[in-house]
Amino acid sequence: TVFLANEDKTRLIFKAGYGLAPDQEDYLRGVELHLDNPASRGPLVVSFKEKKPFLIDNASTITEELSRRSQELLHLSGSSSFISVPIVFRDEPLGVLAVDRVQSTISLKQNDLDLLMAIAPQIAISINNARTFEQMQASEEKYRDLVESANSIIIRIDAHGVITFANRFAREFYGYLDHEMIGRNIMGLIVPERDVQGRPLFPATREFLARPEEHVTVENENILKNGERVWVSWSNKAIHGKGGALTEILCVGNDITARKQAEYEKRQLEAQLIRAQKMEAIGSLAGGVAHDLNNILSGITSYPELLLLELPDDSPMRKAVTTIKKTGEKAAAMVQDLLTLARRGVSISNAVDLNAIVRDYFESPEFDRLREYHPNMKVDLQLDDDLKYILGSEVHLGKTVMNLVSNAAEAMPEGGTVIVRTENMYLDKSLKGYDNVARGEYAVLSVADTGIGISEEDLKMIFEPFFSKKVMGRSGTGLGMTVVWSTVKDHNAYINVESEEGRGTRFDLYFPVTRFLVRDKAPKGSIRDYAGSERVLVVDDAEDQREITRSVLRKIGYHVESTSSGEDALEFLKDNEVDLVILDMIMEPGIDGLETYQKILDMKGSQKAIIVSGFSETDRVKRALALGVGSYIRKPYTLNDLARAVRTELDRR
């Protein structure tokens, strides 16, 4: 018979027997020999406690020393001679092996004891192995339960990347059944061939499998069964077999998609903030410079017009004066770019037709000059005849078309095709680079080329001020694409850029449509068509501006007075009446055009007036118009524009 100690070693419990009658075995299954009772002195208990064997050749000699239970056990066995041998493993008693000789009158001898002493260690090893196996089974079941219930991705892969195990969370996360994952390689199953930027991921995966010890923690892009892209943070443990060969890698992962998205949005916001601050700083500087330049350019553009009025048609000076005038107009156009950059030069109150703006540009001298530099350039116009109107500034939209076509031409040094397309589109989804896009109808302007394309690095820079890769001296101030970007922003529009090196680039501009009708442009007559004899007061802090305006208006018959400040104008008007006041909006030091006009109204009740400004409709210009100012003229203005505005306001009832 074999008795084994319980877990806390307080009892010896029958576990197995050989040669026992059924009633004997049933009895033994209910027997527990107390190891924790000092009075318990049976041979099995003593053999266990003292780790000593006992050979009893005459059981009757020890009967009186036994407890009642031990006496019953001895009586039941009918044994007169027996051996008790401790089962010991690594000096720790596990139980007792008891052998008796019931069916023989021959007593057990020393050689029987020696045999059992030799067998007992083997029994101890077997018992220990069995217990270890049971513990391993229990541990494995506990481990499997733990792994299956974990809220993390847990997979095991072999040295080639083949999945050998995936827990429940992993299967549910990726959307696969168990048999769809086991035996499959991670490459192509949970690791996509390329990331969202198109970069191959397999080389990095092969590097990980070759040297997993160098990639204990990894963050990478994964793909679900439904094609959705996610980000996972992995903790990896390489497992090596005998000889140090890699046998498998245990990978524990957590979904970090939300964190990655938050980090991306944070970077986007930071970039937008930096860009906004940069544009604000440059814009403020540009706006101030532009205002001063406009005052200077007024003389350069206006005096040549006065000279041309005086010069005979065959005068050799006409060509030189005309060149000066055109040069001034080019400079004025550049200043307009600065104003656009400063976000102070755009009025988008008019309904305009994008198709007309596109056609006007391709019939302009600017496009003719572009063709001279790019004779191999072809143009493909695909204009939607039913294109809807947008609210916008014709000047700035024209500049936008010019800049986009110019860039397209520069991108095709060997020639190619510029495709300009317009179409109506309903937008109900986001655009790349925009968190939110207003749902609705848009008129879309697309300018594409078949040129060299733009590198990924340059794409990040194309809207930066003064970034240019055009031919130096031929075209480009570095403001062209910045003007495009600013114009798009001012028109509450969106812009999308697609480019592939060696294949070309396409710009798509989305402008909200309007239901307003397009106004017919006012016809331009001769400056003498706007002549008159009324009294006009010119108020401007720049002496050359006052002189230009006086000269033009006197030339066509008006009686003109001038002052250098708003305060002087008020003093003049206390004792004098005029039919029209021409007010500069920005005058330093002192009160500006709006405040001057307010005080004139307080003094006289009503007064016809015109505002001139180096900027477009600023808030203060709009307030002046709301108070009764008839119109505003942007500097530098042509003599025709000035004369027409004066005559129109004087004739207004």
Image: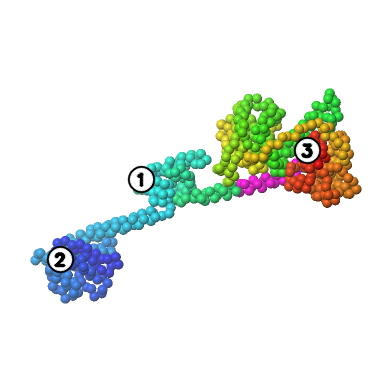
The part of the chain drawn in magenta is 270-295
Can you say which quadrant of the picture contains the N terminus? bottom left
* Residue in the picture at 88% in, 45% down: 577
- In 3D space, how far apart are the residues under numbered discs 3 and 2 (Cα atoms)? 124 Å
* Residue in the picture at 69% in, 46% down: 280
- Nearest the eye: 192 or 635: 635
Q: Is residue 277 magenta?
A: yes
Residue 446 in percent (x, y) is at: 61, 34
* Marks 3, 1: nearer the viewer: 3
Which residue is identified by label 3? 636
- In 3D space, how far apart are the residues under numbered discs 3 and 1 (Cα atoms)? 77 Å
Do the CB atoms of the residues marked 2 and 1 lie less than 8 Å apart? Answer: no
- Chain-order first, disc 2 or disc 1: 2
- Among all residues in the image, which is located at the extreme top? 314
- Nearest the eye: 158 or 110: 158
Q: Kindly state the secondary structure of the residue where label 1 is placed.
A: helix
Residue 30 in percent (x, y) is at: 21, 68
- Report which quarter residue 531 is drawn in: top right
- Chain-order first, disc 3 or disc 1: 1
Q: Is residue 647 above or below residue 93?
A: above
Residue 378 in percent (x, y) is at: 62, 26
- Report which quarter residue 74 is drawn in: bottom left
- Chain-order first, disc 3 or disc 2: 2
* Marks 2, 1: nearer the viewer: 1
Which residue is identified by label 2? 23
